Image (cartoon, grey):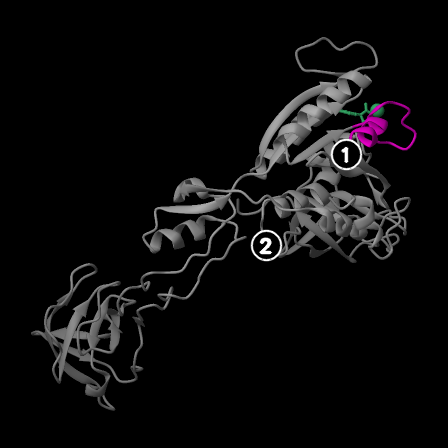
Amino acid sequence: MTRILQIVNAIEGYDPEALHVDKARAAIRACLVPVAESVRLPVREALGRVLAQVIVPAIDVPGHDNSAMDGYALRHADLGADQTVLEEIGAALAGRKFAGSLGTGQCVRVTTGAVMPAGADTVVVQEVVKLRDGKVTVPAGQKRGQNVRYAGEDLKTGEPVLRPGQLLRPSELGLIASLGLGEVQVRRRVRVAFFSTGDELASIGTALREGEVFDSNRYTLHGMLMRLGVEIQDLGVVRDDPAQLEAAFRKAAADADVIVTTGGVSVGEADYVKPMMAQLGEALFWRIAMRPGRPMAFGRIGNAFLFGLPGNPVAVMVTFYQFVREALLQLSGRTGDCALPLLKVPAAEPMRKLAGRTEYQRGLMFRDGGEWKVRTTGQQGAGVLRSMSEANCFIVLEHERGRVEAGEPVQVQPFEGLG
Ligand code: AMP
Ligand code: MG
């Protein structure tokens, strides 16, 4: 196995002591190897999974030329420069075909989705025609082929429509179902084992002693991992004790593709977390030029990739979303760019920022009249989890940028999507 250090050292501008967030992302991306195994699932259960096969239609969708509107199917050649009177000879309903065929001067009533009657090439919507005694008067100005959906217009027999690496969203489930397929081959889920470290951590259900805090990071991690659709293994709180840490790391590495830990990776940390990571596998200890979330470990223990996230409650979320999220999506076998979108919104207020690091401030986007703006949410300390809870986006202030004045555009990453 190629050593991680060898791979990351080849990245231009890689500096573990002051790592630009883009370089950290590139370093991680260069090391990851997606999971290969796949499973066959009923279409509904494949929601949120990554396709492991190519989908090639065996049928056209739609299967026949059909009407896009309720109206009258006719032969365009019959229409004159002025209005035209046609004879109505029958009806074609969705799912019920018109058996005959149109002759000169004839039309057939059609509903949306009805197979186009033989001989007809155009549909006129019912709202514009006049009906009298079985005669249909069509106004001038109709275009040939209007309001007709053609066979294979959506999906064509033999033309691949979905490829391996495609995330299966509701639209893909529908698309697969429209081909009559009941099952699909998808990658297996990425398995993530995680635990918290620190002697000051108390599990919920125990009494807090002086100097202790409840272990909240395992709950935020649980939430973030669940939303990404990975398989999780929660290994609890692990004391800062070599034997316990070793046991936890070994257990995690035995089953998981990824190990996520929180705490114990700070620069001044004198405990056992970092030495244990280095002893059991290969671990790089980074100082990332970002705020919050400066310290982070990345490496591998056995076959599992390791993310040693900082302990501060906001820092663990920021580093997860900025590095681990994309890594998990890449490992899941997804192709294409999985980065969160960055949108530009004017700042509603000045923002303090130091050049030389990327800052992830917690923001609240809001509508001011017709325009979206963003402001920060309260105290921005790395330990103030409330700043995340009150936020609906990250305000991503670029590495080089200094102080932001009110009205200047800033980049935001909204927390919520369609899902
Ligand atoms: P560390 O990264 O271990 O230096 O921790 C930084 C800060 O985050 C300290 O104030 C810790 O008490 C706090 N912290 C560490 N782990 C957790 C956790 N699992 N839940 C809540 N706070 C934590
Ligand atoms: Mg600590």
Mark 1 = which residue?
309
Query: Mark 1 belongs to which amino acid?
Result: Leu
Please state which of residues 159 and 243 is positioned toward the viewer in this rendering.
243
Q: Is residue 2 left or right of residue 222?
A: right
Indicate the position of residue 97 as horizontal and vertical percent values: 15, 64
Mark 2 = which residue?
335
Residue 200 can be seen, yes or no: no
Q: Quadrant of ligand 1?
A: top right
What secondary structure is found at the residue carrying circle 1?
A: strand
| Residue at the spot 17% in from the left edge and 69% down from the top edge | 109
Residue 307 can be seen, yes or no: yes
Task: Please identify the quadrant where the N terminus is shown.
Answer: top right
Bin the neighbour count of mark 2 within 10 Å (Cα to Cα): few under 14, some 14-19, many 20 and up.
Answer: some
Q: Is residue 186 magenta?
A: no
Q: Magenta residues? A: 263-281
Query: Mark 2 belongs to which amino acid?
Result: Thr
In the image, residue 212 sits, relative to residue 409, either above or below, namely above
Depth-wise, is mark 1 or mark 2 nearer the camera?
2
Q: Is residue 17 left or right of residue 74?
A: right
In the image as oriented, which residue stretches furthest toward the bottom?
A: 81
